């Protein structure tokens, strides 16, 4: 049986054999080593909140405590497991987590290269890989921090490559493996399910014109679906056996539905307007991305797989938009598709020049232009990559968050407590529990849900206070920082609960440490924002 041609045809692109392939691979490896060096230099960046959550729950998993038992949030457990694996290998430290991120990012870069090479040849793959390596390391998308979106990208890219190979070779086993990868992408973060939807629709479109018996089609589709469902099904079984399924379901489904429906288009617009100008920098790189995205309109070369590229880009945009929370690191989900478009753009222009029979020097001008644009763009990040130390860079990115101060607070508590002591946390700074290597007295890793206008908020406030009062933690940390609760307006709207928490901290507890938070963030008590540390004085 004749199968769908793999990659581009020889009439549309050079074969990619010989010196060109070696140069492409060499350039990509050189860029990957460069950005790995940048990440190593900055690997001691203080953890931010999401990283603190992942690290703390991962730490609990290494102790044999399942997610959602004594620490809960609406995120699915895939990234918790990934953190636990990274810390098991590289150590339960900030630098160990960032070492794991280096490998995840390098693997994703290689997969971007392989995807571009599979579709359009080695040059497109190299440009795509180089572009992704750079864009995913930019502070504008918080690329130096180990957010869940990095892990979604890795799993989704693996699934897409396996899907393409399965379509071309008609191997059912590869379809199953592809489904497993998409199932893992979903476990890392809920928007990952959109890449599975994209895969299923693309597979159906490719299979539609083939003279395959319906039974074979059903078997192949069943393999893809079975692979997709398997990771989630196994997770549910394990959490059920651990006795935490009800908590897991409440947080990842019941509360997640409330959270996902709170933001309106009017609320989303300011977030998008604040994030997007930083995401689409440097503009020259995104101009090349735009050329590649529109290339099928004028290039026969780009049209060979234009439907796949455009659909992949569109689904990536939808993944970013899901829930209408346009936080910078969400845009990492868009970067593989954008990088692929950059590779298509450079190669489409080059191929157009070849078809017009320009000389070799002119034909290579698009590649030279990309190299210059890339070099200038990287040079624009020189201060970030090579001048600022981790503390200074953290302050530049998070000028009103206490992530740097949390390191000292966690170290203080660890030095003045026993392993069995617990921490009562008023605020959303789970990284402190990770630094201190002490359990949180409450299962609420963030106080954000308690402040939100959603139907579970009042019950959550009561539940959290009851948990803290019952646990009688050795230490209490009160984060008088607006961004640890929401916004300055949140402090005013929920002043009653904050006064209750503040009063509890002053009853049977003594203030033993207070760390001033730089950047002059909004606060409620005192003359400036502090992380207050209280120690219990009564039994």
Image (cartoon, grey):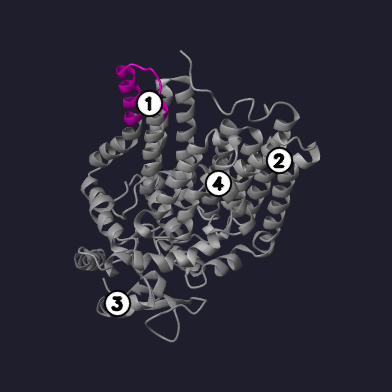
Q: Which residue is mark 4?
A: 294
Name the residue tied to disc 1.
Answer: 208
**Image depth: mark 3 or mark 4 in front:** 4
First in sequence, mark 3 or 1: give its number: 1
Q: At 68% from the left edge and 45% from the top edge, which residue is drawn?
A: 31
Q: Which residues are magenta?
A: 206-226
Mark 4: few, some, or many residues within 10 Å (few <14, many ≥20)? some
* Residue 341, quarter of picture: top right
Q: CA distance from mark 2 to mark 4?
A: 26 Å
Question: N-terminal of the two: label 4 or label 1?
Answer: 1
In the rendered structure, are the residues bearing label 2 and label 4 in contact, judged by CB atoms less than 8 Å apart? no
Extreme-top residue of the structure: 1
Asked whether 53 or 178 is in front, the reply is 178
Q: CA distance from mark 3 to mark 1?
A: 59 Å
- Kindly identify which residue carries mark 3: 498
Gap between marks 3 and 4, in whole Å? 52 Å
Q: Nearer the viewer, mark 2 or mark 4?
A: 4
Label at residue 27 = 2
Residue 450 vs 289, above or below: the answer is below
């Amino acid at each position: 049986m004749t199968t769908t041609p793999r990659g581009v045809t020889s009439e549309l692109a050079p074969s990619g054999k010989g010196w060109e392939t070696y140069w492409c691979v060499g350039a990509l490896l050189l860029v990957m080593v460069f950005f790995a060096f940048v990440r190593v230099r900055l690997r001691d960046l203080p953890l931010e909140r999401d990283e603190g959550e992942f690290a703390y729950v991962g730490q609990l998993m290494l102790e044999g405590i399942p997610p959602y038992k004594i620490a809960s949030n609406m995120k699915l457990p895939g990234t918790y497991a990934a953190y636990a694996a990274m810390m098991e290998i590289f150590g339960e430290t900030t630098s160990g987590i960032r070492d794991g991120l280096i490998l995840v990012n390098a693997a994703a870069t290689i997969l971007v290269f392989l995807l571009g090479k599979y579709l359009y040849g080695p040059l497109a793959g190299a440009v795509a890989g180089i572009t992704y390596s750079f864009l995913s390391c930019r502070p504008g998308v918080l690329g130096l921090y180990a957010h869940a979106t990095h892990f979604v990208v890795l799993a989704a890219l693996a699934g897409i490559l396996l899907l393409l190979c399965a379509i071309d070779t008609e191997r059912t086993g590869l379809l199953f493996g592809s489904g497993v990868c998409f199932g893992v992408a979903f476990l890392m973060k809920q928007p990952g399910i959109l890449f599975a939807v994209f895969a299923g629709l693309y597979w159906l479109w490719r299979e539609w014109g083939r003279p395959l018996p319906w039974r074979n089609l059903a078997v192949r589709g069943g393999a893809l679906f079975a692979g997709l469902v398997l990771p989630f099904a196994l997770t549910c079984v394990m959490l059920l056996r651990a006795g935490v399924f009800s908590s897991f379901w409440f947080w990842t489904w019941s509360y997640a539905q409330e959270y996902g429906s709170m933001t309106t288009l009017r609320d989303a617009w300011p977030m998008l307007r604040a994030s997007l100008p930083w995401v689409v920098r440097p503009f020259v790189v995104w101009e090349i991305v735009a050329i590649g995205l529109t290339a099928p309109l004028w290039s026969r070369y780009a049209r060979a797989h234009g439907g796949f590229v455009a659909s992949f880009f569109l689904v990536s945009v939808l993944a970013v938009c899901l829930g209408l929370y346009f936080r910078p690191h969400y845009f990492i989900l868009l970067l593989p598709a954008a990088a692929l478009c950059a590779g298509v753009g450079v190669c489409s222009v080059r191929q157009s020049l070849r078809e017009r029979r320009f000389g070799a020097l002119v034909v290579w001008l698009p590649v030279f232009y990309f190299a210059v644009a890339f070099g200038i763009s990287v040079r624009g990040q020189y201060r970030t990559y090579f001048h600022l130390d981790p503390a200074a860079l953290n302050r530049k990115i998070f000028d009103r968050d206490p992530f740097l101060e949390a390191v000292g607070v966690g170290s203080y508590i660890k030095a003045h407590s026993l392993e069995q002591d617990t921490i009562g946390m008023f605020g959303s700074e789970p990284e402190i529990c990770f630094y201190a290597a002490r359990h949180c007295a409450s299962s609420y890793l963030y106080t954000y849900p308690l402040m939100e206008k959603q139907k579970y908020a009042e019950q959550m406030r009561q539940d959290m206070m009851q948990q803290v009062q019952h646990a009688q933690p050795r230490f209490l940390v009160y984060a008088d920082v607006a961004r640890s609760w929401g916004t300055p307006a949140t402090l005013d709207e929920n002043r009653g609960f904050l006064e209750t928490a503040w009063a509890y901290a002053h009853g049977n507890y003594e203030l033993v440490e207070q760390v001033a938070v730089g950047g002059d963030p909004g606060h409620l008590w005192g003359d400036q924002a502090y992380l207050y540390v209280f120690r219990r004085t009564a039994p």
